[in-house]
Image: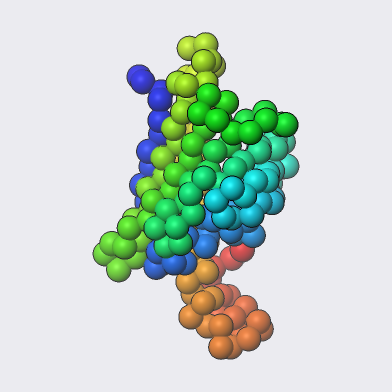
Amino acid sequence: MEHGSIVKQIHIDATPAVVYEVISLPSHIAQWWTDDADFEPHVGGTGTLTWAGRATNRPFIAHLTVVEAVPGERFAFRWLYPDGESATATNSLLVTFVLEERDGGTLLTVTEAGMREQGWEAAVLEEHYRSHDAGWTRHGPRARVASRAESHLASHRHLGPSGRAAAVRARGISGL
């Protein structure tokens, strides 16, 4: 196996604008992927993604730098580079989300690339690949649920906070 990049696709019953918010805004990312996210979601924005216990059994903080941000179309960042360094092709991985309007919703393609460029030994490369592949497989459906919930909430903004909460309970969307 090549172990160079991971590509996952998932169809989400929400508009590309809603899905973009879910995959690019720290407050949403902390609902479906991490325990916390703190970064500016624009090109050049830097910050961290934190896994503390809810999202994983292995606490971890990853640095990231946003490299592309086109609302409703693409969002990309470099991550997992050493503290105190700037992200480069040889010290970080590139995650790209591409959104395409399709079948009344959004086809989300997630690509994580750059593992081979890290210079890792074969066993380390294989372990990172397997771990990240399993992670994207596990978290993709959670992004789908978060997008559906956000889409549903957006359609009920006129109800105010308590009305939106009631609408969410009525739809059976929880954990957000």
Quarter of the view holding residue 170:
bottom right
Q: Dividing the image into 4 quarters, which one contains the N terminus?
A: top left
Task: Give me the residue at 57% from left, 26% from top.
Answer: 91
Task: Give me the residue at 53% from left, 15% from top.
Answer: 120
Asked whether residue 86 is in view, the answer is yes
User: Would you place residue 126 above or below residue 59 in this image?
Assistant: above
User: Would you place residue 41 above or below residue 105 in this image?
Assistant: above
Image coords of residue 121 (percent x, y): 52, 11
User: Would you place residue 56 above or below residue 104 in this image?
Assistant: above
Image coords of residue 132 (percent x, y): 51, 33
Asked whether residue 12 is in view, the answer is no
Q: Is residue 64 left or right of residue 16?
A: right
Q: Nearer the viewer, residue 138 or 68?
A: 68
Q: Dividing the image into 4 quarters, which one contains the C terminus?
A: bottom right
Outermost residue, bottom side? 158
Task: Give me the residue at 66% from left, 37% from top.
Answer: 62
Image coords of residue 48 (percent x, y): 68, 44
Q: Is residue 120 left or right of residue 107?
A: right
